């Protein structure tokens, strides 16, 4: 057994106690349960509780994932904002489906979402862009995310020029900036347990309503 294998085996996981999860007393709409769990995570001091892993696939079906911030949750679904020219933006233009994963380690809770992705349009994207900090807008204006970078000086010069533009034109909006929503076709709430008797509840969309079902751990 290798050193790293031993190290990984010795790491402690799921050291409770954790909050109970009564699956008999849950709302019909999973958005309400998610917001309740999010409020608990915020109150319990979970770091960056709105951080989520976005999983997409490219034209060949090869999966990709990265961590983003949840922007909103409404009837359209879970919102996130990215450049349409980024790798994830290009992937979504070919395969407009995605999965989201939230993990709140302190609470031993996960939420997993799957569904189609919809571009909410330039008005929503522009409003989100305008609300971003100056530095974030300057970085987004570059429009070169994931391109190969030759040297730090090139990046520093481009950022400085973009920052000057944003400060000179505070109302300027990137044409590439978009807000997308993942519609909830399926969402699972996972409550971990030190005993490994985990609790799992899945909602599946059926028309305009959701069917609830428990899952084996």
Image: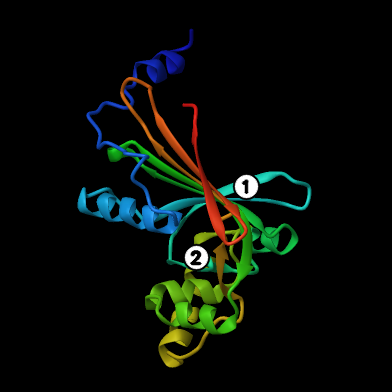
Marks 2 & 1, CB-CB < 8 Å contact: no
Mark on residue 143?
Answer: none
When the figure is inspected, residue 22 is found, relative to residue 39, above or below; the finding is above
Give the image quarter of residue 168: bottom left
Q: Residues within 10 Å of mark 2 (few under 14, many from 20)?
A: many
**Frontmost residue, 165 versus 96:** 96
Farthest-out residue, right? 60
Give the image quarter of residue 197: top left
Q: Is residue 213 visible?
A: yes
Position of residue 162 measured from the top left corner of the image (x, y, whole percent): 49, 79
**Foreground tag (2 vs 1):** 2
**Frontmost residue, 146 versus 68:** 68
In the image, taking residue 47 as reference, residue 91 lies left or right, namely: right
Determine the secondary structure under disc 1.
strand
Determine the secondary structure under disc 2.
strand
Q: CA distance from mark 2 to mark 1?
A: 18 Å
**Which residue is located at x 34 percent, y 16 percent?**
10
When the figure is inspected, residue 104 is found, relative to residue 150, above or below; the finding is above
When the figure is inspected, residue 76 is found, relative to residue 217, above or below; the finding is below
In the rendered view, how is the structure colored?
rainbow
Mark on residue 79?
Answer: 2
**Frontmost residue, 101 versus 133:** 101
**Which residue is located at x 43 percent, y 72 percent?**
136
Position of residue 66 measured from the top left corner of the image (x, y, whole percent): 53, 50
Q: Is residue 147 visible?
A: no
In the image, taking residue 60 as reference, residue 164 lies left or right, namely: left
Mark on residue 64?
Answer: 1
Mark closest to the chain's N terminus, 2 or 1: 1
Position of residue 2 measured from the top left corner of the image (x, y, whole percent): 48, 11
Position of residue 155 measured from the top left corner of the image (x, y, whole percent): 52, 66
**Which residue is located at x 54 percent, y 58 percent?**
209
């Amino acid at each position: 057994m290798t050193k790293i294998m031993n190290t990984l085996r010795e790491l402690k996981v799921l050291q409770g106690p954790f909050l109970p999860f009564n699956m008999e007393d849950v709302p019909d709409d999973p958005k309400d349960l998610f917001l309740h769990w999010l409020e608990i995570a915020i109150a319990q001091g979970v770091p960056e509780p709105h951080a989520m892993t976005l999983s997409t696939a490219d034209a060949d079906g090869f999966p990709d994932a990265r961590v983003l911030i949840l922007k909103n949750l409404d009837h359209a679904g879970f919102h996130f904002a990215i450049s349409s020219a980024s790798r994830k933006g290009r992937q979504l233009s070919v395969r407009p489906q995605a999965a989201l994963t939230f993990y709140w380690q302190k609470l031993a809770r996960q939420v997993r979402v799957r569904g189609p992705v919809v571009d909410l349009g330039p008005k929503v994207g522009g409003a989100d862009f305008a609300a971003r900090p100056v530095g974030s807008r300057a970085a987004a204006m570059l429009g070169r995310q994931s391109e190969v970078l030759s040297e730090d000086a090139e990046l520093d010069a481009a950022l400085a020029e973009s920052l000057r533009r944003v400060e000179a034109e505070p109302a300027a909006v990137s044409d590439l900036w978009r807000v997308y929503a993942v519609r909830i076709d399926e969402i699972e709430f996972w409550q971990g347990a030190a005993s490994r008797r985990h609790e799992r509840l899945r909602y599946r969309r059926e028309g305009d309503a959701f069917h609830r079902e428990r899952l084996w751990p």
